[in-house]
Structures are given as C-alpha cells and as structure tokens.
Image: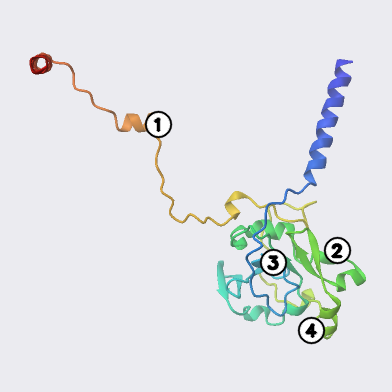
Amino acid sequence: MKTLKKIGITLFVLMIFISLDGCVITAPLPQSVQYTNPAWAPDYYQGVRYYYFPDIEAYYDLSNQSFVYLSNGQWTESYNLPPAYSNFNLYGAYVVGVNVHVYQPWVHNEYYVAHYPRYYYRNTYKGHDRENIRGFNENIRKPFVRTPEARNHFNEGRRQENEPNTIDNSRPADKPIYYGRRVGKPVKVKPQMRENRQANPATVKPQTRENRKANPVTVKPQTRENKQTNKEAKTTRRRRQ
C-alpha cells in the first residue's frame, strides 16, 4: 500500500508540473510606450520595440527605425538591409513581435533562432491560413493576422511570401540552444534580457568576514603607560566634579 501511495503522489506531482508548463504569467506591459510602425510591418501592438525576421535572422529596432543584422561576425545597425538581402520582400516577410520586456534581443540571438528557425511557419500554418498570417506576437502568444484592409491595400506582388531560393542565405544558421516543442513558442524572458535602467548604481560592499580579514580593526594593547594615563584621567575628572 505504501508503494502505491508513493507512485500516486509522484504521478500527481508530475501532472501539476506538466499543466504549469503551459501556463503563462503575464507581467504588466509598458502600454504608455509606442513607436512608429513601418509601412511593411503588421498591425502595431502597443509597446513592441523589436521585430525579428526568422528567414534572415535579423532584427528591426522601431526606436531607431533601423535593421540589426550580423556582418562579418559583428552585429551591425543600418537603415537598410545589406545587399545580400536585396531581394527580401519586407511586405511579405514573416515577422515576430518580440516581448516588450526584452532589450536588444540580438544579444540573445541563440534563443530566437531556436524558437523561430528559418521558414518554420511553413510547417506551422498551411494553405489559406498562412496567406493571412504575417507573423507571431510573443506578447499575446498569437499570430499577426492581416486585416481585410491590409489585404485589399497591397497587391499580390507586394504581399508575395519570400521563397528560400530568392534569399541569399549563404551564412549558415546560428546554432540554437534547443529544438523540439519550443519551436514557434515565445522566448522566456530571463533577467539578463531586460533593460538595466540603473546605469551606474552605487554599490556598497557589506562587511563580510573576508573584508574584516583584509581590513582588520587594530586595537592597541593595554600597556603600563596606558594604564597610568587612564588612572590620571579618571583622577582629574573626580577632582573637577
């Protein structure tokens, strides 16, 4: 009976962890922040600062209106994409709206190439659904859907999806941290991915044992001269009283 109880408790705990894995704890979003959305982008979600292009592993910073991409092993910022991506159609590109709490996502590029590999959406969305989807919004865990106005405003040529053979992806894809069931799901925001608003915080070292050893408090030994001096001081105080 004890063995059965242990097995039952173990299964119950495992079911709790599995159910919690799919839960999302949403933090308050900076709704007061809003950036100018480029004409090629999907409908703006308030607070979004960065877009990620999985097909070319590049980013777009809305605060600077510039692209950020790898060039000779260095992240480069420019108002235009490099010549290698001259055939890349921004109006038909699949984009990811990065979580509003992330700062400079390209610093953590390995997570984004793992969650959003090149052309992964071709297997995620099929047929007519894929034609109406512009990307994925990490903040609400839902795709960016083309509105009827957007579908009517742009002709089929401008909304043409990018084909792998039209993009110069001679640079090999960055090695991701993991694959599997995380593909197509939001990147978990870790503390180091947030913007550090305290540029130069004042740090005060606590008085630890090591500090005490490094900076010991010196105490003079009680010598005869010190004892006589203390006695004389006490005697003078009594006379004054």
Q: Nearer the viewer, mark 1 or mark 3?
A: 3
Element type where label 1 sits in the image: loop
Q: Badge 2 is on which residue? A: 123
Between 124 and 180, the one nearer to me in the picture? 124
Q: Badge 4 is on which residue? A: 158
Quadrant where the image shows the N terminus: top right
Q: Which amino acid, mark 3?
A: Gln
Quadrant where the image shows the C terminus: top left
Q: Which mark is residue 95?
A: none
Between 147 and 221, the one nearer to me in the picture? 147
**In the image, residue 102 lies at what x, y percent?**
63, 58
Mark 1 and mark 3 residues within 8 Å of each other at the beta carbon: no
Element type where label 3 sits in the image: loop
Element type where label 4 sits in the image: loop
Between 178 and 127, the one nearer to me in the picture? 127
Q: Which amino acid, mark 2?
A: Asn
Q: CA distance from mark 2 to mark 1?
A: 56 Å
Q: Earlier in the sequence, mark 1 or mark 3?
A: 3
